[in-house]
Image (cartoon, rainbow, N blue to C red):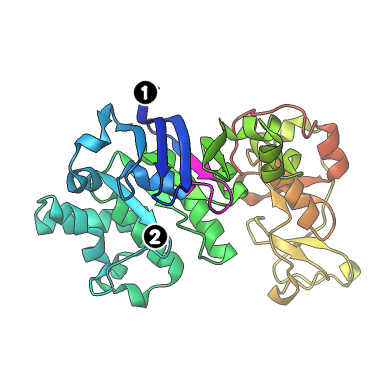
Amino acid sequence: MSNMIEFRDVEKRYPDGTVAVRSLSLDVAEGQTTVFVGPSGCGKTTSLRMINRMIEPTAGRISIDGIDAATLAKAELRRGIGYVIQNAGLFPHRTVAQNIATVPRLNGVPAAKARDRAMQLLELVGLPAEFAGRYPSQLSGGQQQRVGVARALAAEPRVILMDEPFSALDPVVRAELQEEFSRLGPELGTTIVFVTHDIDEAIRLGDRIAVFEPGGVLAQYAAPEELLEAPASEFVAQFVGRDRGYRALSFETFDVDAFDALGSLDLVAVGDRDPGLAGRWSGLVDAAGAFLGWIDDGRGDAASIRSRAGAVRPGDSMRSAMDAVLTSPTARAAVLGDGDRVLGTIGLAELAEAGVGGQRGGAGARP
């Protein structure tokens, strides 16, 4: 795999003597997502912005696809790099479609073709076509961020820079966008450099993670599994957290065949009433047998449903399986098969017997 971006002994030193980035050397592989993570003031955002020369390095060399970025005109360089920032940064006086078409139009793409591209990208990022004529003020924060991603993709750049794009969003929307992004990255094959201060976000999205420590020093650059299993220093170990063993379960795949037997679960169809189940948690299913959630008294009405949180499917990560057990009202997760039909249940004891925390990286499942 070739390198798209190369840092060689890059430094950023300000006139007052402050060193934001110190002797940074690393390679960003083509088509992968590389995450820069670390505490505030560690140089991660400065390193990102030096790629498109929003900040000029004091020393060293940054090359993009083998070309020294310093030899390119800034406008030319930036039109070939998508850029997504916190709070989207959309033009308030332009419609969604016009925002997305901005860079293609600057590159000379005819208006009709640029609009067609904008409509394709709206669908790609999960927004309905009718949003094309709306203005940013008419969108939620999460919707604006989706438009920001679409705008970054509009000129089909080989590189996209993302500077804490999801940090201002509420946890639910943030999780949704992380899920969308984890799907888009591999699908597009674009080289992405992503900045965050959230180690969980870094592990969820990154193919490789660069951990920066205060003083602008690169503390470790590794795949998420390696970072969790073998922190290079005490700083990295503390930053990743004492629960890194739990995070490492993100890279183990939940396999139903690993269990000798699954536990049973009482099922109640929507609309059924069974007083004999009062005070017990049961699984609520629809007419086709698909799991809808947990119900506490067998009445079958929506008011008594806990949620679908305590369910896991083959192919999910072991971390998801553990979370499903811990969030289930019965301390047992519902195991779902094709069509979300209930295959049975599992608990912590079965997960332990199946070797949770034993083997790493089976299918490379993301959290």
Placement of the N terminus among the 4 image quadrants? top left
Q: Earlier in the sequence, mark 1 or mark 2?
A: 1
On the picture, is 24 further left or further right than 212? Answer: left
Q: Residue at x 64, y 42 (%)?
A: 316
User: Is residue 336 placed above or below 298 in the rendered structure?
Assistant: above
- Residue on which the image places disc 1: 2
Residue topped by disc 2: 146
Can residue 87 be seen here?
A: yes
From the image, which quarter does the C terminus lie in? top right
Q: Nearer the viewer, mark 1 or mark 2?
A: 1
Vertical order, 114 against 261 (above or below): below
Q: In the structure shown, which secondary structural element does the residue marked by tag 1 occupy?
A: loop
Q: In screen coordinates, is 151 left or right of 198?
A: left
Crowdedness near tag 1: few (<14), some (14–19) or many (≥20) residues, C-alpha within 10 Å: few
Disc 2 residue type (three-letter):
Arg
Q: In 3D space, how far apart are the residues under numbered discs 1 and 2 (Cα atoms)? A: 29 Å
Q: Position of residue 281 (x, y in %)?
A: 84, 63
Q: Which residues are magenta?
A: 34-44
